Amino acid sequence: MVYHSPSHSRSNYRVRRKRLVDYFLPLFIFIAFAVIVILGWQLYRSIASKNELMDVYLFIPQGQAKILPSGSYNWDSAVNETRVLQGDEIATQIQSRGVVRFFQKLLLRIDEETTVALTEVSPGRFKDTYNIVMKDGTLWVNTQLYEDKDMKLTVHTTNLVVQSSDGVFEVEDRDGTQVVRVVRGSVEVAVMVQEGTSQREVESVKVPMGQEFIMDSRAYEAYKKYQSPEVFGPISSMFAESEWYLWNSSLDGDYLR
């Protein structure tokens, strides 16, 4: 007699019934993927935005300017919002002006027929350092935007070294006369005289708010003789009424109040 096992007589295959989670699992996966994409995009934008804030840009509100890239001998025409690098030189034409913004903080406004070189632009974790060489012309500097960390700004003219970390001031070097006018805060000015191929410092003074430091040929010759000429005075009304001053003060607004 032959016996047959029940397992052979009928199928033991059972169809698994879908649970509720099986219907929502694809939706959960899609939502998770979308969240990852969105977070990744936001991270990318954050990094890109941070890099942009660390850049230096030249704006041209009036006229024309040109730029000499570091290591180059050929000047290029600058366009509005030109990115500027350490070692670059900037020159404005007649009836032209430029504005250099460093890391969305320091403002440097350049008057017409002015040439400046950005010899050092060093952002630091706790302190930013800038060295500007003005070969000729006029600059307006506003360091009042610095609020979150320290900074050191140095502007070099033919015979002056101007330093400030918190102030609004103007530096001028034209026709043999060098002037520093302090609109807000104070600045340190070191007087340098030429000795052979190098310069030596003969005096360091502090220029307070509302004062101007003027060094002409007479004062320079006195400094060479180790004398202390009269170089201080109140900011002249002619300067305070000039179009250059009114333009800058209108842009600075609350920083001058």
Image (cartoon, rainbow, N blue to C red):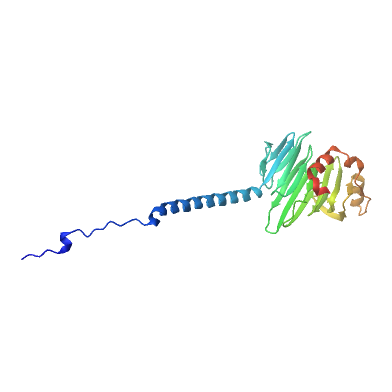
Who's the residue at 72% across and 36% down the image?
A: 65
**Residue 145 image offset from top left, x and y in percent:** 75, 51
The quadrant in which residue 81 appears is: top right
Q: How many marks?
A: 0
- In the image, residue 134 sits, relative to residue 227, either above or below, namely above
The quadrant in which residue 63 appears is: top right
- In the image, residue 22 sits, relative to residue 177, either above or below, namely below
**Residue 122 image offset from top left, x and y in percent:** 69, 53
Residue 172 visible in the shown view: yes
Residue 54 visible in the shown view: no
Left or right of 180: which side holds 75? Answer: left
The quadrant the N terminus occupies is bottom left
Residue 61 or 121: which is nearer the viewer?
Answer: 61
The quadrant in which residue 10 appears is: bottom left
**Residue 162 image offset from top left, x and y in percent:** 81, 51
Left or right of 117: which side holds 213? Answer: right
Residue 194 or 202: which is nearer the viewer?
Answer: 202
Who's the residue at 73% across and 45% down the image?
A: 117
Residue 43 or 135: which is nearer the viewer?
Answer: 43
Residue 240 or 93: which is nearer the viewer?
Answer: 240
**Residue 220 image offset from top left, x and y in percent:** 89, 48
